Image (cartoon, coloured by chain):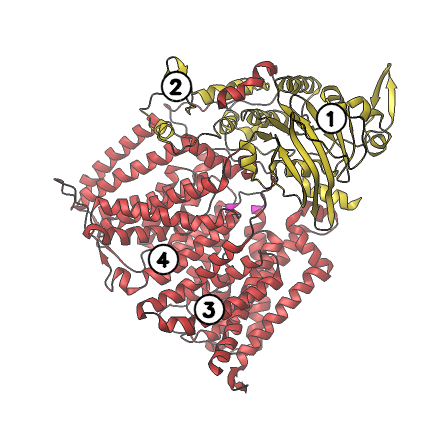
Chain colours: A yellow, B red
Amino acid sequence: MPQAESTTNANSTATATTTDVLTVQGVAVRFGGVAALSDANLTVRAGTVTGLIGPNGAGKTTLFNVISGLQSPDRGTVRLLGTDITAMKPDRRARLGLARTFQRLELFGTLSAAENVQVGLESSVKWWQWRHVKRAFPWTKRGVPTQDGVPQGEPTGPGSTAATTADRLLEGVGLGGLGAHQSSAMPTGLARMVELARALAMAPKILLLDEPGSGLDDAESQALGELLTTLAAGGMGVLLVEHDMELVMRICDYIYVLDFGDVIASGTPDEIRRDPMVQAAYLGAVTEVDGVESAAVQEPSPKSGTGPEDETRQVGER
Amino acid sequence: MSNFLQFTVFGIMLGAGYAIAATGLVVTYTTSGVFNFAQGAVGMIAAFGYWELVSAHHVPVLAALVIVLILGASICGAFVERVLMRRLHGASAERPVMVTLGLMVILTGMATILWSPTTQRTVEPMITGQFSLVGINIQVQYVLIIAVAIAVAIGLRALFYTTRTGYALRAVVDDPELLGMSGVSPNRMSQYGWILGFMMAALSGVLLAPTQTTGINIEAMTLLVVSGYAAAIVGRLKNIPVTFAAAIAIGLAENYVLNYVEPHLPANLQTDMTSALPMVFLFIALVTLPSVRLRAVGRLTSMKAPRVAGGRESLVAGAVFLVVAVVVAFAFADTNIKGTTLLTLGGMVLTLAIVGLSLVLLTGYSGQVSLCQFSFMGIGAFIMGKVAGGGSLLGLIAATAICAGVGALIAWPTVRLSDLYLALATFAFADAVATGFFSDGHIYGAGGLMVGRIVLPGLSLGSDTAEFLLVAVFFVLCAWLVLAIRRSLFGRRLVAVNDSPAAYATVGLDIGFTKVAVFAIAAGMAGLAGGLYATVQQIVGTTDFDIFPGIIFVLFVTIWSIRTVSGAFLAALTYVVLNQLWPSSIGIFAGIGIILIGRAAGGILGIEALHVRLPWVKAPSGTSDPSGHLTAFGGTALATEGSRAAG
């Protein structure tokens, strides 16, 4: 169990338990001659927020891509609720309960914010079934079909359950009333929340968030932290990549530190804060301000727009 | 044995010609990220230019080569990069494809005007003579082609992998900004790439021209490079040695099939086999190519989405359209233009508009480029003429269903790959069908295939008026269907898969299934249009569904707006009107139009300044400024929202 473990150094092997929602074991990825991930291991338990931190180019986004199926690993396995998903396509993984957001926004830019969320909500709906096809006809009665007063299915279109639920999800991430806006026209911070709402629409068992806090101000970042904590309290596993150390240290139950494609440490926030290897690689010296220990992050906040290829380049440069 | 060696030498020579053209494609793609569909047309212009200089004006061969390959090709390459391609940076993915197609139809249109297709032009070999080796006669021209191809492949490989310029040329597509920071102008590198690509195209055209024993032909020379496509694809559009080897293999295979397999086929299938070979090679290359990795590119489409009419609004608009059609049908029942009734022309406009609607669905919504919608039209027309004696509703149903099935088969091998490969597959399919199927005298018959007007029980639709109204009804139904699809769950998925394939997959949706499904629907719609077109014209012939008219029509739809029903209709109207007025220049109009529209993804109808809001149309919601702070987060309720909706 991650929480029970003390700080461990590189190459620690994650041990699966029945509550482990995600297990990554020995994952390695090379881009040409550059190793983006050497031997990545981590576990995310249901009902916890797990942090994944590290300098730019450490391999965090590459690891997210491996977990979500956008990148095949050269070695290692990824398990979701005990099922080996290493060779599965991204859509199958998503249907098993894995959702993610992206460091560089991947919105359906032509669609409105609400429609973005609807696509996530309706992902399990088979559009070719007649009950969905017939809703395209203008004379079809809109709204929620009921049977004995119980809503049935997920009809589409304005006023449908999906549309209503999309609005509620957007409201939940702080975008109440903005559902009709074209998502590509939204500022980055708001657009990130559309991505989050779309991911939540899939009712995931594990949620991968790649720098969701960038573009948010302090109050919004605070609210995001509360939201993630609440989601975890509901039983969801959350894996968070974030450079806002204050947010990470406040909400994460367990943290993995990645550097040069290796997990160099893992532990509780307190343990990570005090780990000398982590301080040297990423956090910097632990200082005491007004009686509270805090770690000064050495790395500047990452520029938006760094992706796996950028990481490769940075790894190569170093 | 000597025959085998003879075929082998000729095959290697043919492959060497393909290799030069294919490496040109690879060079342009590597340095600009653009697949130049005009590569063959550039080679064709070079071949005709060379013929003009050497044969018509008796310019010495060496001087002609310098003028065509060094001066002409480099100036044209630099011009195309500077004027056409540079401003497309950041445009939607299909736009560079459209612009190179525009360039192709401009060049073929110009060639048709400059060099009458009825005149036979034979290009003499640069070096005449032959020699004997191990019992076979080898022309010196063949040796020259093979030697030049080897030199080009080695030279380009050395350039790209051993020089600073070569590294910069390769880097310019990956990260032009980073290249700029290292002190190298990305624009200049891209321009070098286009110059090199044009020179390779011209070289292949000039070298292969003397091998055309019946003389150089505009269309044949332009499409000669299709075999090079397969080689470039095997080389994954970046590996020159693999591309070279694949081109040689294709040249050999083509020659062996032509000499060993074709003679054993029935006479009527021999031409079909020859025409289908490039297509077969291309599909083999596509099927064997490993899947491309789905990448999160972080490119956020910023195009303003066109307004989609609601269900009732589209019903009302459809009804109004039909009323106008009735008025036109009776007001102009006896009007003739150049010997054709106005209503027949109107019927052609409406059937082509249905093809335009299929492009709205396919390219406008889902972002896939198809260059073979006219081929589906032709297949639909053929089926219409053959099923139930022609003129039957059953024929329309069969045309739609069979074309949908064929469409699915074409799309299936390419869905694992990027959308460019689908465009290539459809280009090759259009070429193969036009030259191998439609041109076969047994398909449409020597005088064309007669198709009767549709007969319904108790209802005569034999007159032009009735036919026009019938086609108008089908157009309205198809337009309504396209809009209904866009408003539906499936429509949202089409737009989503175009905007971000990576996000599409990570929300649990199958990209391949969606793409094949929409391609099949669009192909079926084009097949239906073909069936209707046949009943309007009452006779369809071998040249009605050629590859070039099909491409020109795609360009017109893009020029007007490939995302709207109005765009499809206006494109069809423009096409038919221009085809009546200036048939030989229609390609030039389309090419110039697509170049002028440039990166404006919404086409003419998407230009904001032209938008006039009708008083009864409500302003779309979501137009206020969305900037500002997030409102309060509602975490507690949210935790269960997704599961409630999904469950």
Judged left or right of residue B374, residue A213 is: right
Residue farthest front in this picture: A18
The lab-note entry on whether marks 4 and 2 share a chain reads no
| Residue span colored magenta | B88-95
Judged left or right of residue A152, residue A65 is: right
The lab-note entry on whether marks 3 and 2 share a chain reads no
Image mark for residue B9: none
How far apart are the alpha carbons under marks 3 and 2? 60 Å
User: Is label 3 in contact with label 1 (beta carbons under 8 Å)?
Assistant: no
Q: Amino acid at mark 1?
A: Pro
What residue is rendered at 45% in x and 48% in y?
B412
User: Is label 2 in contact with label 1 (beta carbons under 8 Å)?
Assistant: no
For disc 2, the marked residue is A143
What residue is rendered at 73% in x and 58% in y?
B164
Q: Amino acid at mark 3?
A: Glu
What residue is rendered at 47% in x and 19% in y?
A164
For disc 3, the marked residue is B254
How far apart are the alpha carbons under marks 3 and 1? 62 Å
The subunit letter for the residue under badge 1 reads A
What residue is rendered at 64% in x and 23% in y?
A46
For disc 1, the marked residue is A2
Give the mark nearer the N terminus: 2 vs 1.
1
- Crowding near the residue tagged with mark 3, few <14, some 14–19, many ≥20 C-alpha atoms within 10 Å: many
Where is residue B29 shown, x and y percent of the image?
Answer: 58, 55
* Residue B89 counted in the magenta span: yes
The subunit letter for the residue under badge 4 reads B
Near-viewer residue (B119 or B244):
B244
How far apart are the alpha carbons under marks 2 and 1? 46 Å
